Amino acid sequence: MFKKVAVQVSIVSTVIFVSGCSNKSVDTIAVEDEANAVQIQADWYAQPEHSGFYLAWKKRYYEAAGIVMEVKAGGPNDNTRQKVAQGTVTFGVARLEDVIMAIDRGLPLVAVGAYLQRIPLSLMVHADQDVYSVTDIGDRPVMASAGSLYLERLEARHGVSLNTIPHMRTIARFLSDKELVQQCYLTNEPYFVEREGVDVRVLPIYNEGLDSFRVLYTRTDLVKEDPDLIEKVVAISHRGWAEYIAEGDGYEIAHAAIKEMNPEQDLEFMKWAREQMLSHGIVTGPSGQVEDLRSVTRERVQEMADELLNLGLVSRKYLADEIMAWEVVDKVLEKPIPSS
């Protein structure tokens, strides 16, 4: 029998100058059974890019499956992959390539399900500049996070060398420097740039030939210890995402939960961010079909692992079976996304 537990969800984004970075965010929504907590943790404050988890929590879908949900926000100093590997938290969320590289560093981790088919990571340029692709950037300065994996992938794929400068975590320089190219999330910075009266063009990395998607992951021994728990958490999370992108009040419920966790989040901004996710196929990929939000294949995982090997970013060839727990993933995909 599946025991009644508490799930602790820490939800994140990656841009720190907007309201999500506030130190006024709430760390925890308390529950009674904290001693038996199961955690899904990421590494930033509550933001729209993790709305599906908040929706499933707020609508008590985890609880209905015997799971009492506890929500705990992340922050800039969280080392989520290490925590998951050590068993401090049960689940984490990350890009697949980050999980593969963590496995290569010796962490006993495995991915157990996909939940965003594209990531909103992008580069932004002033709309009046003749820059429509990475190959058009030339020697323009590119403000980006140091050591960003996606930059190495872009340079290798397009045969370019980008003139990167340190990311200042602000849009101030971008507003005044038309030559500047800046790393962004298409669900975030462009909103604030355009509010300042500056037209912006976004270059999503998915349009630049980089296949990247986000996954839930856990420690490897949990796959044998409690595969039923993993299957339930993944399937319920998929339901949250399906309802978030559907017509109806699902997204409003999710955004209200996010605002509860992070009071400085703005409802208008979150609605705009959701619109960007829908128009860019961030959740479902290009098909726009709800069932595709959880799509993942061995071939796709293998291609990512091989790309990292070719770039010299992992020490050996990894097989798809070493990266994802297919015995769980396949069981989830055999069934439709749960619904009422």
Image (cartoon, helix red, strand yellow):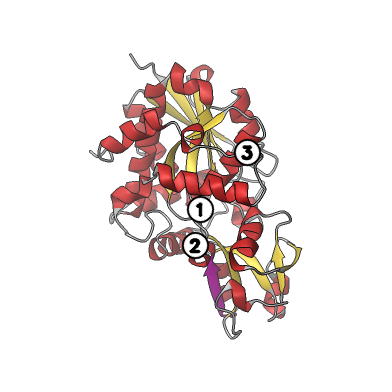
Q: Identify residue type, mark 1.
A: Ser
Residue pointed to by mark 2: 206
Residue pointed to by mark 1: 212
In this rendering, the count of numbered labels is 3
Tell me which segment is drawn in magenta: 197-204
Local SS, label 3: loop
x, y percentage for residue 253?
38, 48
x, y percentage for residue 106?
65, 30
Quadrant for the C terminus, please. top left
Quadrant for the N terminus, please. top left
The reply to whether callout 1 and callout 2 are in contact (CB within 8 Å) is yes
Foreground disc of the pair 3, 2 = 3
* Residue extending furthest toward the right: 166
* Residue extending furthest toward the left: 340
On screen, residue 289 versus residue 259, left or right, reads left
Q: Is residue 181 above or below residue 332?
A: below
Local SS, label 2: helix
Local SS, label 1: loop
Q: How far apart are the two marked residues, 3 and 2, measured between alpha carbons?
A: 26 Å
Which mark identifies residue 316? 3
Name which residue lies at 65% across and 64% down: 155
Q: Identify residue type, mark 3.
A: Arg
- Which quadrant would residue 55 be assigned to in this image? top left
Q: Earlier in the sequence, mark 1 or mark 2?
A: 2
Prevailing SS of the magenta stretch = strand
Name which residue lies at 52% across and 20% down: 221
Q: Nearer the viewer, residue 238 or 275?
A: 238
Q: Identify residue type, mark 2.
A: Tyr
On screen, residue 22 versus residue 47, left or right, reads right
- Which quadrant would residue 314 be assigned to in this image? top right
x, y percentage for residue 39?
52, 29
